[in-house]
Image (tube, helix red, strand yellow):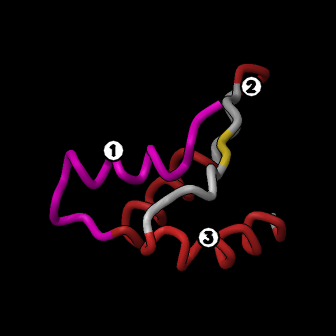
Amino acid sequence: MYDKYAMINTMRLQDPDLSYEDAFEFLSYNVWGAYVGEATPIYMYTFDGSGEERKSEAIDFYYDCLE
């Protein structure tokens, strides 16, 4: 199980010019949406992020429910 916020923050630490939205979009398309067989990891929200993260978590959760 992986924390989505931690993954976004890790990407942003590796590339300081990367915005939250760009990191979210990259992970959403390339990682979280990938099916890699029976060993596909589970990704979750901790709902314990920064103000910037909390601002978008309701929208993110809504879109996750649509998938």
x%, y% of residue 16? 16, 59
Going by the numbered disc 3, the residue's amino acid type is Glu
Query: Which comes before the other along the chain, label 2 or label 3?
Result: 2
What whole-number distance in Å separates the C-alpha atoms at marks 1 and 3? 17 Å
The residue at the point 45 percent across, 45 percent down is 6
Which class describes the residues within 10 Å of circle 2: few (<14), some (14-19), or many (20+)?
Answer: few
- In the image, residue 26 above or below residue 22: above
Q: Residue 1's mark?
A: none
> Circle 1 is placed at which residue position?
10
Query: Which comes before the other along the chain, label 1 or label 2?
Result: 1
Which class describes the residues within 10 Å of circle 1: few (<14), some (14-19), or many (20+)?
Answer: few
**Element marked by disc 3:** helix
Q: Nearer the viewer, residue 48 or 8?
A: 48
Specify the quadrant that holds the C terminus. Answer: bottom right
**Element marked by disc 1:** helix
- In the image, residue 48 above or below residue 62: above
Specify the quadrant that holds the N terminus. Answer: top right
> Circle 3 is placed at which residue position?
57
> Circle 2 is placed at which residue position?
37
Which residues are drawn in magenta?
Answer: 1-19
| Magenta-drawn stretch contains 4 | yes
Q: Tell me: 12 left or right of 16.
A: right
Asked whether the beta carbons under mark 1 and mark 2 sit within 8 Å of each other, the answer is no
What whole-number distance in Å separates the C-alpha atoms at marks 1 and 2? 25 Å
The residue at the point 44 percent across, 58 percent down is 26
Q: Tell me: 24 left or right of 37.
A: left
Query: Which comes before the other along the chain, label 1 or label 3?
Result: 1
Going by the numbered disc 2, the residue's amino acid type is Gly
Which class describes the residues within 10 Å of circle 3: few (<14), some (14-19), or many (20+)?
Answer: some
How many marks do you count on the picture? Answer: 3
Going by the numbered disc 1, the residue's amino acid type is Thr
